[in-house]
């Protein structure tokens, strides 16, 4: 199926499309990268209006992947996956919601495969989030490089930074779970995104996320876009954990 466009608006008639399908760079199992928010970029309070990209197993429901440990193909060894059987999980993404709906739509054949010209049209002048679910490191670097070349700006994060080449640091923030991880990532040329608990002050190498409650919710990711790896010259970013993530972060903080 091909993407079609409205006669007047020239906007895509379908809200999502397939960016890439193939073997995960983490273990070789089948995965797919799907973009949503192409008609009208999706918005939430913190991110603002952004195209979202979803990295999911192509051959099983996201929850099945979590319960069987097969989500390693899309999340690597991220500690937020829990115990590999769906327990002690602390990832902020509710995989039974958007990722499941998107996987089902993908299996129904809802999404067209996006051509180079579709990507050019849909991503031009847009903000894009690399990995609304899943780690971008599971898909080819060249895919993300192509998307950021086309788009106005982007955000992206990886827990796999210790295994990635320096080229990735130009696109993504290293997700640091502890101050010592932050220091290690900095020493290896990464900017970091650190979720912390109340007692940790902002390190001299960091600034608070301007969209956070503690910073007064000054902006959204789409407008701020400081989380674009070393493509931004800003300091690293820190944000206080809230909601379900708070308990998890307390587990890791030292
Ligand atoms: S620093 Fe900016 S881009 Fe990063 S999470 Fe906060 S608002 Fe989003």
Image: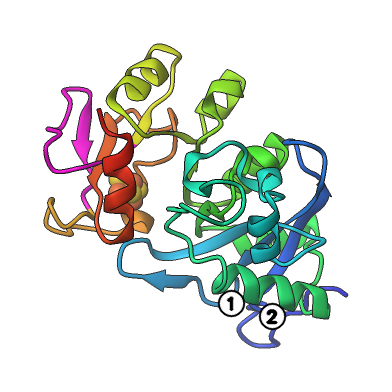
The x, y position of residue 252, in whole percent, is 33, 35
User: How far apart, in angstroms, are the residues tagged by discs 1 and 2?
Assistant: 7 Å
- Tag 2's secondary structure? loop
Residue 224 in sight here: no
Q: Main secondary structure of the magenta part?
A: loop
Q: Which residue, as the protein is rendered here, is positioned at the far top?
A: 187
Identify the residue at horizontal 81%, vertical 60% (top origin). Answer: 115
How many dots with numbers? 2
Identify the residue at horizontal 78%, vertical 74% (top origin). Answer: 3
The x, y position of residue 243, in whole percent, is 27, 61
Read off the residue under disc 2.
Answer: 14
Does mark 2 have its CB less than 8 Å from ligand 1? no
Residue 235 vertical placement versus 50 (above, below): above
Identify the residue at horizontal 25%, vertical 39% (top origin). Answer: 238
Residue 80 vertical placement versus 232 (above, below): below
The x, y position of residue 163, in whole percent, is 60, 22
Q: Which residues are magenta?
A: 194-210
Residue 47 vertical placement versus 150 (above, below): below
- Is-magenta flag for residue 196? yes
Task: Give residue 43's quadrant in the image.
Answer: bottom left
Does mark 1 have its CB less than 8 Å from ligand 1? no
Label 2 near label 1: C-beta < 8 Å? yes
- Is-magenta flag for residue 172? no
Read off the residue under disc 1.
Answer: 39
């Amino acid at each position: 199926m091909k993407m079609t466009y409205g006669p007047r608006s020239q906007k895509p008639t379908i809200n999502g499309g397939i960016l890439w399908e193939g073997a995960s760079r983490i273990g070789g199992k089948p995965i797919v990268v799907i973009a949503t928010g192409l008609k009208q970029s999706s918005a939430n309070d913190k991110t603002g209006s952004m195209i979202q990209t979803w990295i999911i197993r192509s051959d099983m429901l996201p929850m099945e992947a979590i319960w069987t440990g097969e989500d390693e193909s899309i999340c690597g060894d991220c500690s937020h996956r829990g115990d590999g059987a769906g327990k002690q999980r602390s990832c902020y993404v509710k995989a039974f919601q958007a990722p499941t709906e998107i996987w089902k739509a993908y299996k129904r054949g809802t999404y067209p495969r996006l051509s180079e010209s579709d990507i050019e049209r849909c991503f031009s002048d847009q903000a894009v989030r690399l990995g609304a679910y899943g780690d971008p490191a599971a898909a080819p670097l060249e895919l993300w490089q192509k998307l950021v070349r086309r788009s106005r700006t982007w955000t992206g994060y990886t827990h796999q930074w210790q295994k990635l080449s320096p080229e990735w640091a130009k696109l993504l923030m290293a997700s640091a779970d502890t101050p010592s991880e932050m220091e290690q990532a900095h020493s290896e040329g990464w900017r970091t995104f650190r979720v912390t608990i109340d007692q940790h002050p902002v390190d001299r190498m960091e600034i608070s996320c301007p969209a956070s409650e503690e910073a007064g919710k000054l902006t959204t990711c789409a407008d701020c876009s400081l989380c674009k790896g070393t493509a931004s010259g800003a300091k690293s970013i820190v944000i206080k954990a809230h909601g379900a993530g708070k308990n998890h972060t307390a587990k890791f903080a030292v």
